[in-house]
Amino acid sequence: MPLDRRQLLTVLGIASLAGCAPDPTIHGDPAHVAPAEPTQGPAVVELATALAGLQRAIGDEPDPWRGAATAQVEEWGERLRLLEPLEGGDPHFPAPTAGTTEGLAEALTATTTAALRAAESAEGQAMRLLHLSILAGATGLGNTALPPVTDGAAPARFVDVPTSQVLPVTLSHVLALLQGLERGLGLLGRDDPAKEQVATRRGEVRLLRNRITEAIGSNRPLQDAHYELPPIDATTFGPVWAGLELAVLGGLLGLAATQDSWVDPAVSQVSKAQAAGAQLPTWPGWVSGPTG
């Protein structure tokens, strides 16, 4: 999706000279004035503290989920400690002290609440997507049956993209999912317990398709395109379905980075993907590979 194109922003400095009348006041040498020490915003501090509490709560859970979740939360926390979280480097800010939150459920609630606040106060879509990714990932940690996985993706800078450009890309993921579900329904036997689940999900995806096409407006596609999907049979349908759900999650997170009204659908998509058996990556919504 366009939001995953990693493009470095160019910062232009503008210097100006101004004449002034002589001033009898003795001024210090500006060259000796120390620059202000960078600080984290209150919302980021709150999120970093919540992550420290979450990491502590995860330690009480069994493996293999505990190990995978710990690695994920550690990576989130280390990223927030960077002076430039979208560029990498060495930690600049001190590690936070965990709060008094007790229990995994409470720690997850504190983390998702803080991640949403950080996203709301973020400047630029890239930083907003970083925090929304933590929001989605922490939401996924509520399902301890599905440990997160590492896919090599990580946050990076990109140029803000209009919602109008992200909507068609997200729609393509939704239509591909719908096509996959249709094919799966044709493969599942009449008495297969998964058939009802797939049929119900197809109805939900149709509603999501309608919402996105309505948002696109007059430029929406005239008809559903045909999407090249991996080979699907009775044994491969499950993994293919999970992958298609993750693609929709990525698209919705991209939309949420451009417009607040898509945050709730993106968060809701987490449980939909997990219901299909999908394991969330460390950074949902981000992709690895060359920039575009």
Image (tube, rainbow, N blue to C red):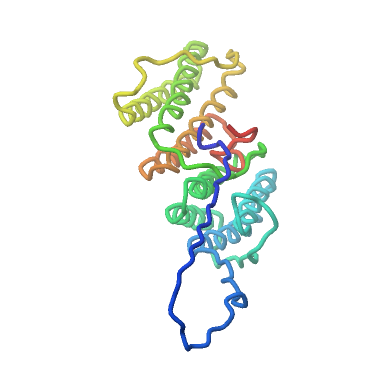
Q: Position of residue 211 (x, y in %)?
A: 33, 30
Q: Is residue 291 above or below residue 98?
A: above
Q: Position of residue 128 (x, y in %)?
A: 48, 48
Question: Residue 221 appears in which quarter of the rendering?
Answer: top left
Numbered circles on residues, count: 0
Task: From the viewer's perspective, tell me whether residue 169 is left or right of residue 215.
Answer: right
Q: Looking at this view, is 264 or 126 the one in front?
A: 126
Question: Residue 60 appears in which quarter of the rendering?
Answer: bottom right
Q: Is residue 118 above or below residue 284?
A: below
Q: Position of residue 71 (x, y in %)?
A: 68, 49
Residue at left offset 47%, top offset 15%: 185
Q: Position of residue 175 (x, y in %)?
A: 44, 21
Q: Is residue 105 above or below residue 156?
A: below
Q: Looking at this view, is 23 or 145 the one in front?
A: 23
Q: Looking at this view, is 232 or 14 the one in front?
A: 14
Residue at left offset 48%, top offset 37%: 271
- Check the picture and name the quadrant holding the C terminus: top right
Residue at left offset 43%, top offset 15%: 225
